[in-house]
Amino acid sequence: MSRLPDFEGLAMFAKVAEEGSFAAAARVMGVSVPTVSRAVARLEERLGGRLLNRTSRQLSLTEFGQSMAARAGEIYRQAEAVEGQAMELSVQPRGLVRLAVPMSFGVRWVAPLMPSLIRRYPELSVDLHLSDASVDLIGEGFDAALRIAALPDSSLVARRLCSVTQFLVASPEYLARHGHPGHPRELAGRPCLSYAYRARSQLWRFTHESGEEADIEPKGPLRMTNSEAAIPVLLEGLAIAELPEFMASQYLADGRLVRVLPEWSMTRGGLYFVTPSARTRSMKITALSDFFHEHLSQPVWQWSGNPPVRTI
């Protein structure tokens, strides 16, 4: 038996344990399923113990496998760190970055930046995960994320790129039929669309220019996991909804939507580039952070507050 540790087998076993299947591990590492399966079998033979219980439908760690998974994972992460530090010596950032981005923001404002990113860093590849659901960067193996929040998670290193405001909006036709509410409590009984992934609370929290605060629970005919679904209902004049500035600004600009309760502010958050604090920031992550700061720190979608003249 070779005295050199089976680093490949340990790495592949660590990825199988993390991903929960041979197929998922193979996909992440860019190799074939048989390659992963042979590496784990070779490692089991070398160690003299079974690491995984395999059936046609399920894969689970044995007691021995559970004791080895954490240590194998640490070896994998250390190897990644060594490679990352070596890549910093390269002239161009290179390698894979797993990036999590909110769905609507990613489609509207991040995807159009990808051609520029690819041209600038041809040796960099991005695994772009688009979802409005909150992801665990460390637990799910992401290198970085763009997050829109009032306060970033304390466990993450965050770089603020720009402010993002939430607006309460409705169509001019809706307001012409039902009138303008003068206080948040007047929203009770009105159809209000709600967002399922709203951070911390499902309540709408308002702060008046005078300092008065008010909370209301939106109730209405539609609750969605993506705010894009609210727009057709809003444009038809059927409800009131909260929209993020990056989505609302184009409709405010052309007058199809107007602000409701403009003297009351809603969540004032920001767009952040976040990374796990436990990882050494490599050149590719720094380059990506700088790229997004360059393109998103003064976004075109920020609302000037000057709507078109329109009588309703």
Image (cartoon, helix red, strand yellow):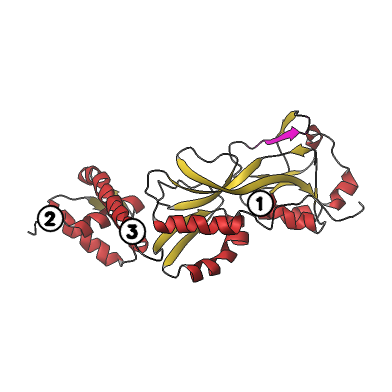
Residue span colored magenta: 202-210
Residue neighbourhood size for the residue with mark 3, other residues' Cα within 10 Å, grouped as few (<14), some (14–19), many (≥20): many
Q: Which mark is residue 46?
A: 2
Q: Which mark is residue 40?
A: none
Residue visible at 60% across and 56% down?
296
Q: Secondary structure at mark 1?
A: helix
Residue neighbourhood size for the residue with mark 1, other residues' Cα within 10 Å, grouped as few (<14), some (14–19), many (≥20): many
Residue 244 in the magenta stretch? The answer is no
Residue visible at 54% across and 69% down?
115
Distance from disc 2 to disc 1, alpha carbons, whole Å, reads 53 Å
How far from the left and from the top, in percent, is residue 15?
Answer: 31, 54
In this rendering, would 20 be left or right of 185?
left
User: Which residue occupies the extreme left position in the image?
Assistant: 1
Of the image marks 2 and 1, the number of the one nearer the N terminus:
2
- Circles 2 and 1, Cβ within 8 Å, touching? The answer is no
Q: In which quadrant of the rendered view does residue 213 lie?
A: top right
In this rendering, would 183 be left or right of 249?
right
Q: In which quadrant of the rendered view does residue 113 lie?
A: bottom right
Of the image marks 3 and 1, the number of the one nearer the N terminus:
3
Residue annotated with mark 1: 227
How far from the left and from the top, in percent, is residue 150?
Answer: 60, 40
Residue visible at 78% across and 54% down?
252
Give the residue type at disc 1.
Answer: Ser
In this rendering, would 218 be left or right of 110?
right
Of the image marks 3 and 2, the number of the one nearer the N terminus:
3
Give the residue type at disc 3.
Answer: Ala
Residue annotated with mark 3: 25
